[in-house]
Image (cartoon, rainbow, N blue to C red):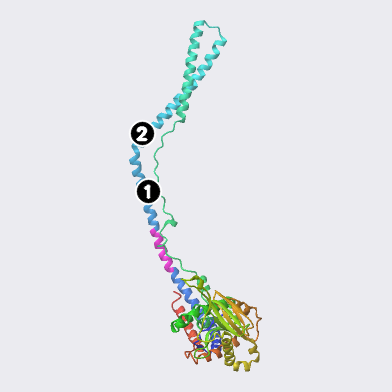
């Protein structure tokens, strides 16, 4: 949905001119700008690559110097470590050697004692010895058995004893490429293919569509309006809410221009009268009047009543619903009918040209306050609450005759009438030509600056 800035005139001609300039720019892009930019990008890439390689070599030389310095430092530290620990290493080696000798000796003692003991045990069984000799041999055998057990135990203890470790030199970690200062490393130039993928012919039409609208989804208009008319601030939230609800349903992909509806804010139809919102899209034309009333609204027998809840701090019994008084009759339906008739009148020429157009104009009252209850009977004017209006609009079938060109033509007629009360205007044709000139300048600078 395009929320048109009311100062722009000749929207239809501006749109047609934007399309024409868009085609011209695309043609020039293929013949002139694109080849120039491609050439500039390639030349720039070659120059940047040479510069990158030179910087990279300098950087790599610096990093290799760091590694060479590290190697030199490690050799010096190794020599210093060996000298500082020489006496300690000699002592440890001597102790470890002694422990190994002792372990070997005890192992030999155990093996020999076991062999001798074995022979002593079988001698008495094969010969008849005197009792004295037998006793001596038995005693010696017992002593030798005790020694053998002791030697075995000592050998096992010595075997399980840990040899003292010799201190080893631990070098500092070698500098790795991922640990180098990445911020100092030259940045490789972006590839030509990658650059060219992001460079396309700019669109005059897209920029034109963007510029003819109020910024921030239409809220730019309400900020300025609130400064000019502070007395109207109370109703602005309702108009914004109505605009947003319609935009949430009818907001189309803006690259498909013809699918967009057109929304006009506060169209002036008199010195003190305006239409809060007019939506022109492929489903119809809606004249909408926002009513930001809280409380209860009733319409019976042709009369409107607005009641609000009042609170009495001192006497709770006096709290309750109270009808609100206005300086003039609350003729909401008549107000909308007056606005509708005025829009019909403003579009007389278009209706005479396209008789089918009148049947497509409708709309009604939109009660936009979140805390409102309505009780309306037999009202000739359509009404809705909040988002209901947007939903009703969405349910309408599309009207093939309401092309985007027709929508712009209708918007032009209404905005022309608006300028009787808000004379500021900017030609949208001039806007398209201005955008086209700026884009051509931009493309020339792109090639000249070699996409830097």
> Where 370 falls versus 336 (above or below)?
above
Location of the N terminus (image quadrant): bottom right
**In x, y percent, where is residue 174?**
41, 51
Q: In this rendered view, identify the residue nearer to me: 411 or 73.
A: 411
Q: Earlier in the sequence, mark 1 or mark 2?
A: 1
The residue positioned 39% from the left and 40% from the top of the image is 167
Residue where numbered disc 1 is placed: 74
Disc 1 crowd rating (10 Å Cα; few below 14, some 14-19, many 20+) is some
Residue where numbered disc 2 is placed: 91
Dot 2 falls on a residue whose secondary structure is: helix
Q: Main secondary structure of the magenta part?
A: helix
Answer with left or right where residue 404 lies relative to residue 156. right
**In x, y percent, where is residue 201?**
53, 79
**In x, y percent, where is residue 326?**
51, 84
Toward which corner of the image does residue 18 lie, by quadrant? bottom right
Dot 1 falls on a residue whose secondary structure is: helix
């Amino acid at each position: 949905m395009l929320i048109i800035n009311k100062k722009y005139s000749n929207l239809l001609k501006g749109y047609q001119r934007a399309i024409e300039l868009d085609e011209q720019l695309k043609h020039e892009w293929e013949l002139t700008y694109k080849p120039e930019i491609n050439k500039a990008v390639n030349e720039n890439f070659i120059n940047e690559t040479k510069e990158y390689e030179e910087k990279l070599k300098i950087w790599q030389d610096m990093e290799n110097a760091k590694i060479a310095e590290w190697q030199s430092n490690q050799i010096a530290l190794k020599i210093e470590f060996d000298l500082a620990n020489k006496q300690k290493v000699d002592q440890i080696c001597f102790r470890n050697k002694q422990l190994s000798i002792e372990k070997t000796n005890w192992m030999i003692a155990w093996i020999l004692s076991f062999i001798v003991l074995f022979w002593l045990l079988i001698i008495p069984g094969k010969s008849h010895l005197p009792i004295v000799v037998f006793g001596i041999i038995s005693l010696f055998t017992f002593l030798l058995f005790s020694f053998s057990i002791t030697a075995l135990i000592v050998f096992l203890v010595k075997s399980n004893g840990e040899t003292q470790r010799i201190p080893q030199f631990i070098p500092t970690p070698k500098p790795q490429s991922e640990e180098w200062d990445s911020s100092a490393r030259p940045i490789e130039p972006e590839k030509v293919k990658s650059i060219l993928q992001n460079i396309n012919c700019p669109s005059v039409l897209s920029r034109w569509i963007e510029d003819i609208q109020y910024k921030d989804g239409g809220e730019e208009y309400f900020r300025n309006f609130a400064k000019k008319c502070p007395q109207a601030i109370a109703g602005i939230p309702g108009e914004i809410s109505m605009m947003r609800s319609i935009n949430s349903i009818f907001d189309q992909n803006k690259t498909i221009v013809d699918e967009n509806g057109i929304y006009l804010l506060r169209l002036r139809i008199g010195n003190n009268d305006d239409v809060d919102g007019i939506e022109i899209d492929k489903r119809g034309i809606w004249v909408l009047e926002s009513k930001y009333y809280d409380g209860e609204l009733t319409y019976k027998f042709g009369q409107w009543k607005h009641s609000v809840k009042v609170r009495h701090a001192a006497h709770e019994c006096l709290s309750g619903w109270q009808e609100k008084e206005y300086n003039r009759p609350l003729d909401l339906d008549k107000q909308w009918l007056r606005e509708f008739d005025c829009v019909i009148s403003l579009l007389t020429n278009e209706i005479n040209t396209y008789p089918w157009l009148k049947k497509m104009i409708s709309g009604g009252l939109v009660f936009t306050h979140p805390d409102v209850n309505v009780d309306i009977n037999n009202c000739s004017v359509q009404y809705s609450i909040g988002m209901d209006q947007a939903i009703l609009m969405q349910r309408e079938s599309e009207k093939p005759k309401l092309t985007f060109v027709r929508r712009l033509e209708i918007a032009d007629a209404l905005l022309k009438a608006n300028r009787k009360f808000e004379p500021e205007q900017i030609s949208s044709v001039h806007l398209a030509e201005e955008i086209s000139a700026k884009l051509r300048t931009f493309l020339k600078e792109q090639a000249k600056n070699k996409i830097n």
